[in-house]
Image (cartoon, grey):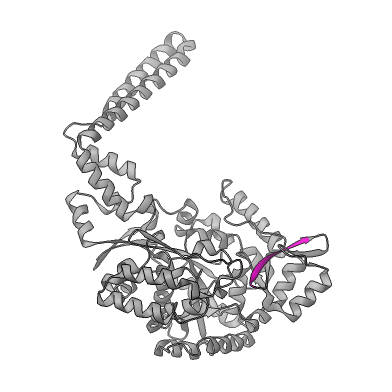
Amino acid sequence: MKAQHLPLRETGFVSGLMCDYLAENKALEPFHNGFPSFENLYRQALEKKSAYNNEIRATLCSVLNEQYQGIESFPKVVKNLNLLKKQSTLTVTTGHQLCLMTGPLYFIYKIISAIKLSLQLKKKYSDLDFVPVYWMASEDHDFQEISAFIFNGKKFQWNTNSGGAVGEINTESLASLLALFKKELGSSLDAKALKELIALSYESENNLSDATRVFVNHLFGRFGLVIIDANHPDLKKEFTNYIKEDLLTHQCEEQVLSQIAAIQKNYSQTFKPQVNPRKVNLFFLDDGKRHRITKTGSRYAFEGTANNLSEKEIIDLADKNPEKFSPNVLLRPLYQEVILPNIAYFGGGGELAYWLELKSFFDSQKVLFPILCMRNAALIISAKNAKKVKNLKLEIPDLFLKRNALINKKVRQISNIDLDLSPLKTALEKQFDQLEVLVNETDASFKGSVQAQKSKQFKGIDRLEQRLLKAQKLKLKDQVERLVLLHEQLFPGGNLQERVENFSSVYTEKGSEFIDFLMDAFDPLSGEFTIVVI
């Protein structure tokens, strides 16, 4: 395997907002706590070390020790669990839904990014310790988003009923799907290892949270990754005051709306919020369901139920049973940063976009806002496809062009006639410049007619160029078809591979060597896209 790199902003798959963030645009500075750099991370670590509540640290360690009971103990995980007891230990976190078989490839890229940065920080700042954490989004209730995965272009769908927290879904109904999937995996040594891991996790554990913890632990435990399921009564108890705050004062809604307006005013009027806040940003967990909490006047209701509570009743409920309350996508980041001694969060562009809405809310709650880090991204190219790329005389940046743009560029390159009519446009531009001078010297009222004629001529050349290109594509049909097939394999449906294919497509061929290679190849603070030839 070998790797090369391309700046994220040159891929065409990163939003303008994230490109500006990576470029350290000053207009975005009020909306985060420092651009990702080692210096800012060290400053953040010292500040978090001083601010983090030691009682919460004790609760965190107790819950983690409980959750790791009965799970294979990797030495580095045991070491990190013990390190978390120390005031000088901070965390680097990523979070994700409990996608079946980890879902798209970027799931593992996020975790590797967090692990790698933790290692880099420890090497650079030996006076502190840094533990990588995977925060399981076990309370999420969007089952459709986590219920399927793609293996070698084939979709495997888990069909079962769920309306509550996905972490509590019983895995018994997975049996037939897993049996079908294991037949597809083949009989290589790495495929057999993956089947054994499936047996240890999804086929042995009773719910999706426990199955995911075991699965991810076996993939990354040797690197010391700590996995947390925050849907725990003791952790929710530490968050009780923030739950009541959201129920009563609605600071999340107020502060987030204010920050969205500030971003639109000071950064970009076209900024569209990734997530909009609600008056109450909480759900209620009951009878295997996750009910949105709504407020009308001074009364609180749980959607889908007959419950209608007064302010006193719901606050009493929060005091007695905080574990029943589940934060939504905007309140979860606050919960995470209250519970963990965290300094950095790794996410994709969409995630970081909604985190950028939250800084003023964190300030209002007197909770330190983490450094936001863009996760690493990668494109995996098989040796066979790498040979095709070479034979087609493509450069790596070419691969990231939209499909039509790539085809047009390639047709122009391999055509035996010059399809570029830009010289003709340049000559025409000069002629109309001369005509405009003549019009200005005679009768300026003809200027509109000249402009109309100029526009008509240029549109005609554009149409002619497109027709010539279309005709040449038909002549070069074989080359175009090979190019389309290659691009589809690398960018399924025009999407990034990492957002479609499951890691098992590569793991069955390369096994843990694949993860080791990415651990070496990724540089979390580089702002680069990694291209891997396997």
- In the image, taking residue 157 as reference, residue 411 lies left or right, namely left
Q: Number of numbered discs present?
A: 0
Q: Name the residue rendered at 39%, 12% in the picture.
A: 438
The N terminus is located in which quarter? bottom left
User: Any magenta on residue 74?
Assistant: no
- Say which quarter of the image contains residue 234: bottom right
- Say which quarter of the image contains residue 462: top left
Q: Is residue 194 visible?
A: yes
User: Any magenta on residue 291?
Assistant: yes
**Where is residue 212 drawn, in percent x and y?**
47, 76
Which one is nearer the viewer's eye here, 105 or 454?
A: 105
Height in image: 473 above or below 314?
above
The C terminus is located in which quarter? bottom left
The boundaries of the magenta stretch are 288-295
**Where is residue 378 drawn, in percent x and y?**
35, 62
Q: Name the residue rendered at 34%, 71% in the picture.
A: 182
**Where is residue 518 drawn, in percent x and y?**
32, 71
Q: Is residue 132 visible?
A: no
